Amino acid sequence: MLPRDLGLRETAIVEAGFSARFSACERTYVYAILNRPAPSALMARYAHHVPRQLDLEAMRAAGAPLVGEHDFSSFASATLLQTDGGSAVRTLRHLEIEPRGALLRIAIAADGFLHHMVRTIVGTLVECATGRRCPGEIPAILAARDRSAAGLTAPPNGLYLAGVRYTDGYDSFAEPPILDATPGFP
């Protein structure tokens, strides 16, 4: 009964008042980058292609200051911040960058995310990994609280909501199939 592009893994009975959005205490996004000179026609919809070799240590150094509680205004959609009026303070609990063959897996977990926050973080990390930015700029980018201070917004292909953890302890995390493949793939 579901559309072809939607799958269901499990169901559960929940208490009255449960909200899939507001009962969540942590969300995890995974972003996939195909990091090799040649693009892949088969993977174009599922991973962002970056042909230039990425410096993973620079990328990790840039990501480290993002972990913790910060105002992430610099990493959110400028339009949303002008119209939302809510707080841009979020707690980023985990940021992991690991190679999987020609794919690069970036996992980011937080108590919540702003619109385009993950994609802007990834775009900024890529700029640090290619030498366009210095990893040491991240604290100043956070302090600026200005979208123009951060890097480009990475494209949506490659972004996956991989899981949501709820206050009752339930965690729906599942590795995106593209990253669950053999480490040498593609």
Image: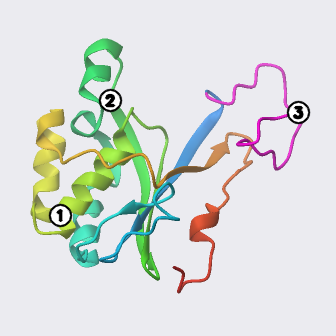
Q: In the rendered structure, which amino acid carries the disc numbered 3?
A: Met
Segment tinted magenta in the rendering: 1-21
Q: Which residue is mark 2?
A: 88
Can you tell which of label 1 and label 3 is closer to the viewer?
A: 3
Instruction: Looking at the picture, tell me which residue is in the foreground, 155 or 136.
Output: 155
Kindly identify the residue that appears in the image at 15 percent across and 51 percent down: 139
Name the spot of residue 47 as percent of width and height, x first: 45, 60
| Residue 175 in view of the camera | yes
Q: Earlier in the sequence, mark 3 or mark 2?
A: 3
Kindly identify the residue that appears in the image at 57 percent across and 69 percent down: 179
Q: Residues within 10 Å of mark 1 (few under 14, many from 20)?
A: many
Local SS, label 1: helix
| Residue 128, numbered label | 1
| Residue 147, numbered label | none
Name the spot of residue 116 as percent of width and height, x first: 36, 37
Q: In the rendered structure, which amino acid carries the disc numbered 1?
A: Cys
Q: Which residue is mark 3?
A: 1
Q: In the rendered structure, which amino acid carries the disc numbered 2?
A: Ala
Can you tell which of label 3 and label 2 is closer to the viewer?
A: 3
Q: Earlier in the sequence, mark 1 or mark 2?
A: 2
Q: Residues within 10 Å of mark 2 (few under 14, many from 20)?
A: some
Q: Taking 63 as reference, is 133 left or right? A: left
